[in-house]
Image: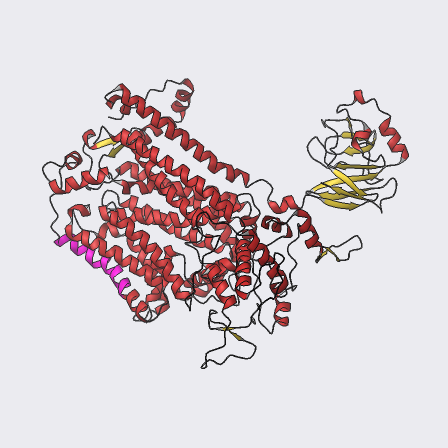
């Protein structure tokens, strides 16, 4: 507060009253400004038509055992892999406690032969290689991120490299035996 | 009386020794002397800067959602209004904010005209203000094109075609502005780019306007300079408090339109997507351009060797350009209309004339409206070119108080006028 | 100088109403609408009936481009109802894995299916006249809902001295009185699910309410927020005036 204002004041009571008024007005000003900022910031969040498109249906029928497809969901690649019995066995045969991000294979795949996950490396968001049989699949036979060398196993779990977490599993549900709904 | 503050906080002192922003703020917005007799008309500068900030903030957010393409612009506006979180709010604030900006600035300007704020030593301050007005007009015009409604499209067509009145190079200039052979995608894209750029130029000029103001200090209702501390009060807390009242009341006014009459200033035709094959029955610009539009249309005959079309354009631009030389057209020694009885009357006539021009601008250019517009246009220029220079010479001003403090206490000199000043102060 | 404010404000109002008068030809009778006024809201039952009228009468020619099926939930339909309703229409999607475009049932995130693929097709089916999109019709016409209602109920026999052109129809409120659209509403043109008698006036009112909603679905949120903002600002202003008076007390 300016000293000019205080010095010209006559009584202490006056000063107190003014201070209260100024405080109240200031507080309301801050509340008002914040309530203006709220919608301004909110407008940057996903809009209604983006949210409405947040689910996608995938037909699993054409994916052969050992094959994988990549589909778009919310602007992100989703890996869907029809795993072989060998891959499932490899994924199950791991000491969970030794993992960086401990998660059992059964927790990551609703039906063991179908692995569905968001194909973005949890390090800095590159797309790991390993969807095509000709891709490098890393030391654990799953996926390998070429950006900074993260290795994922056949359950998409981080095993080596800088990434902190396993490849995330999106919410999905089986509509019937050959169709899933992601989102 | 203004002394450099001693900063106690070491961080502030460290920064201030190297970049004296704290001392600057203290000088310009704390201790800064303001005439103690200012009335609420001196709020409008602060209001204008508030609107500018609101426009820039909402504009940046809208630009994140807008698509500058002829096939998608209108649709993206509907997306903003329907699907973007609070998009409708941002769009209504921005849309009505343009009108608020002009209301505030026009009042600010007429206040300057009434109290002679453009007179020495504030000529440059005034001229920078006219530059701000021109930038605002250009920005508002280009912003109005972006929704790509019928009025957007045809307004853009009509206004850009003004430049075709330029002799010899006119058509070349218009093609250049369009980036094609009609208002089209290229035009929309450049208008979007410039609409985003201009407010920042505007900010810079507003900065100069404020610097110039802080050199010459505020004029006041009595139009006499401050002579010492008895005539002034420090900016803070007196004018922070008073400006805040103005801002509060203004926001109430603004909010009313945004929430309860968002389309009051708008045109229904702009809710129809632009159609280059069909002109709306009645093209009108936004209300703030109406007086200038009336001047443009008032020239229906060739003047000597100048074709009517060119003359209309010249007069329209001239009606603003003439404001640049106003400080030298006004020959009066006394600033404020408060002590100029004839000018006071002339001022109201001029204001009325501007309103008549606005009225004519909204009407079709035919019959009586045209004649009325022509008379009003003639008077507009007469006011500046004849009335102002002559009136300054022949008018006998009332006695002007010798100081602001004397005017405020209402003793001696301009007794009656001083009393009025004090009364207005309290209102 | 206080006069100046009043004059300027009235000048603004003056200018704008001036425009409205100049562009409209005929005086449009005013009606009361549930969505007007500061507390106004859309009458959901009426809007649902209006949607039925749109579906059964208007949708054959007029699109509703900016409305998605999901928006209909705001009118009080359940998600299941909207899904079922959307699935009745087909939209083009694709290309599929073979590179072909294909038709699939619409889902709530699709826009309402248009009656014609493009303006040319619409003109070709309507004797050269283009049925306008109706999403913004209430905002895009001077007079808004009153105009729409008047137009829909304004089909009359032409006065004796007026000759109606081939393919046109006489309407008391249309600019120029000759409109390509034949009277769209007739007594009992639809059978309302809620048993309301489908008179022309009733249907015109319902479709107007529905289209008013379509033109600005956020209106209720706007007015609700406005009330809070205005009350906040009034209190804030009072406080600021008190502060100002205190601060200035020693100067006066």
Q: Which x, y percent locates residue C129?
A: 57, 71
Check if residue B177 falls in the magenta segment. no
Farthest residue toward the left? B412
**C45 vs B370, nearest the viewer:** C45
Q: Is residue A96 left or right of residue C10?
A: right
Q: Residue furthest right?
A: A85
In terms of depth relative to the viewer, which is nearer, C211 or B236?
C211
Q: Where does the image place residue B423, in percent across and percent down from the top left?
A: 19, 39
Which residue corresponds to the image point at 62% horizontal and 47% vertical from the top-left? A49
Give percent across and percent down for residue B28: 32, 32
Q: Main secondary structure of the magenta part?
A: helix
Q: Nearer the viewer, residue C48 or B380?
A: C48
Q: Is residue C234 visible?
A: yes
Question: For the N terminus of chain B, which image quadrant?
Answer: top left
Tell me where residue A182 sits by quadrant.
Answer: top right
Residue B131 visible in the displayed image: no
Q: Quadrant of the C terminus of chain B?
A: top left
Point out residue B313 in the picture as x, y percentages from the top left corner: 36, 63
Which range of residues does the magenta coloring cover?
Answer: B375-395
Q: How is the image coloured?
A: secondary structure
Seen in the picture, residue A13 relative to B34 is either above or below; the reply is above
**Apparent side of residue B410 relative to residue C249 in the rendered image (left or right):** left
Q: Return the residue nearer the eye: B396 or B197.
A: B396
In the rendered view, tell whether residue B67 sits above or below residue A129. Answer: below
Q: How many marks?
A: 0
Is residue B390 on the magenta stretch? yes
C214 sits left or right of C18 in the view: right
């Amino acid at each position: 507060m300016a000293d000019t204002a205080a010095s010209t004041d006559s009584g202490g009571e006056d000063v107190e009253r003014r201070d209260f008024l100024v405080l109240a007005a200031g507080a309301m000003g801050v509340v008002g400004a914040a309530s203006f900022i709220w919608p301004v910031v909110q407008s940057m969040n996903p809009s209604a038509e983006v949210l409405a498109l947040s689910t996608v249906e995938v037909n699993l029928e054409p994916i052969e055992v050992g094959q994988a497809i990549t589909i778009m969901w919310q602007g992100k690649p989703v890996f869907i892999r029809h795993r072989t019995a060998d891959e499932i066995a490899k994924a199950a045969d791991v000491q969970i406690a030794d993992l960086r991000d401990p998660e059992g294979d059964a927790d990551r795949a609703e039906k063991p032969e179908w692995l569905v996950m968001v194909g973005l490396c949890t390090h800095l968001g590159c797309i790991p290689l390993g969807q095509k049989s000709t891709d490098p699949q890393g030391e654990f036979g799953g996926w390998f991120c070429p950006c900074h060398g993260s290795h994922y196993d056949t359950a998409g779990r981080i095993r080596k490299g800088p990434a902190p977490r396993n490849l995330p599993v999106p919410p999905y549900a089986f509509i019937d035996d050959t169709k899933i709904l992601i989102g | 009386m203004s002394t450099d503050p001693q900063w106690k906080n070491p961080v502030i002192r460290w920064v201030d020794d190297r970049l004296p922003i704290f001392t600057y703020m203290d000088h310009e917005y704390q201790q800064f002397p303001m005439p103690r007799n200012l009335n609420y008309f001196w709020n409008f500068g602060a209001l204008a800067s508030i609107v500018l900030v609101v426009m820039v903030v909402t504009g940046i957010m809208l630009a994140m959602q807008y698509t500058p393409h002829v096939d998608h612009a209108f649709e993206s506006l509907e997306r903003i209004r329907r699907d973007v979180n609070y998009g409708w709010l941002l769009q209504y604030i921005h849309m009505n904010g343009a009108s608020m900006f002009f209301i505030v600035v026009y009042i600010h300007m007429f206040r300057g005209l009434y109290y002679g704020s453009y007179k020495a030593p504030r000529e440059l301050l005034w001229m920078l203000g006219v530059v701000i007005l021109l930038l605002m007009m250009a920005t508002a015009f280009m912003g109005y094109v972006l929704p790509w409604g019928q009025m957007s499209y045809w307004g853009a067509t009509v206004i850009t075609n003004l430049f075709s009145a330029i002799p010899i190079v006119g058509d070349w200039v218009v093609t250049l502005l369009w980036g094609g052979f009609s208002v089209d995608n290229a035009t929309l894209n450049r208008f979007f780019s410039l609409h985003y750029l201009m407010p920042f130029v505007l900010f810079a000029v507003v900065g100069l306007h404020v610097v110039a103001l802080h050199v010459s200090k505020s004029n006041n209702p009595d139009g006499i300079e401050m002579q010492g501390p008895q005539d002034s009060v420090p900016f803070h807390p007196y004018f922070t408090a008073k400006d805040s009242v103005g801002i509060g009341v203004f926001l109430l006014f603004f909010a009313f339109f945004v929430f309860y009459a968002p389309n009051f200033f708008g045109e229904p035709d702009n809710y129809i997507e632009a159609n280059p094959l069909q002109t709306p029955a009645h093209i009108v610009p936004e209300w703030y351009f109406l007086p200038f539009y009336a001047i443009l249309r008032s020239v229906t005959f060739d003047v000597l060797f100048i074709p009517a079309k060119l003359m209309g354009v010249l007069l329209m631009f001239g009606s603003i350009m003439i404001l640049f030389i106003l400080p030298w057209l006004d020959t009066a020694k006394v600033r404020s209309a408060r002590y100029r009885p004839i000018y006071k009357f002339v001022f109201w006539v001029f204001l009325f004339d501007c309103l008549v021009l606005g009225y004519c601008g909204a009407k079709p250019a035919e019959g009586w409206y045209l004649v009325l517009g022509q008379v009003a246009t003639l008077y507009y220029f007469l006011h500046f070119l004849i009335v102002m220079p002559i009136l300054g010479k022949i008018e006998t001003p009332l006695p002007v108080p010798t100081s602001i403090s004397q005017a405020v206490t209402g003793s001696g000199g301009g007794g009656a006028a001083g009393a009025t000043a004090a009364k207005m102060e309290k209102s | 100088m206080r006069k100046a404010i009043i004059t300027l404000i009235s000048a603004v109002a003056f200018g704008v109403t001036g425009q409205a008068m100049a562009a409209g030809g005929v005086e449009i009778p005013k009606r009361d609408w549930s969505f007007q006024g500061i507390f106004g809201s859309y009458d959901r039952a009426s809007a649902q009936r209006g949607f039925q009228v749109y579906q059964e009468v208007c949708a054959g020619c007029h699109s509703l481009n900016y409305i998605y099926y999901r928006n209909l939930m705001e009118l009080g339909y359940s998600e299941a109802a909207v899904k079922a309703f959307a699935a009745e229409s087909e939209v083009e999607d694709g290309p599929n894995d073979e590179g072909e475009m294909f038709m699939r049932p619409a889902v709530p995130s699709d826009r309402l299916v248009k009656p014609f693929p493009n303006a040319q097709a619409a003109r070709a089916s309507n004797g050269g006249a283009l049925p306008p999109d109706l999403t913004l019709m209430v905002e895009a016409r001077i007079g808004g809902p009153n105009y729409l209602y008047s137009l829909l109920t304004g089909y009359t026999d032409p006065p004796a001295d007026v000759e109606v052109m081939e393919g046109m129809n006489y309407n008391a409120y249309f600019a120029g009185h000759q409109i390509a659209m034949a009277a769209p509403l007739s007594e009992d043109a639809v059978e309302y699910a809620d048993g309301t008698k489908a008179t022309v006036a009733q249907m015109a009112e319902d479709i107007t309410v529905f289209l008013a909603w379509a033109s600005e679905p956020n209106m209720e949120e706007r007015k609700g927020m406005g009330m809070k903002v205005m009350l906040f600002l009034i209190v804030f202003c009072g406080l600021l005036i008190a502060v100002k008076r205190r601060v200035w007390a020693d100067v006066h």
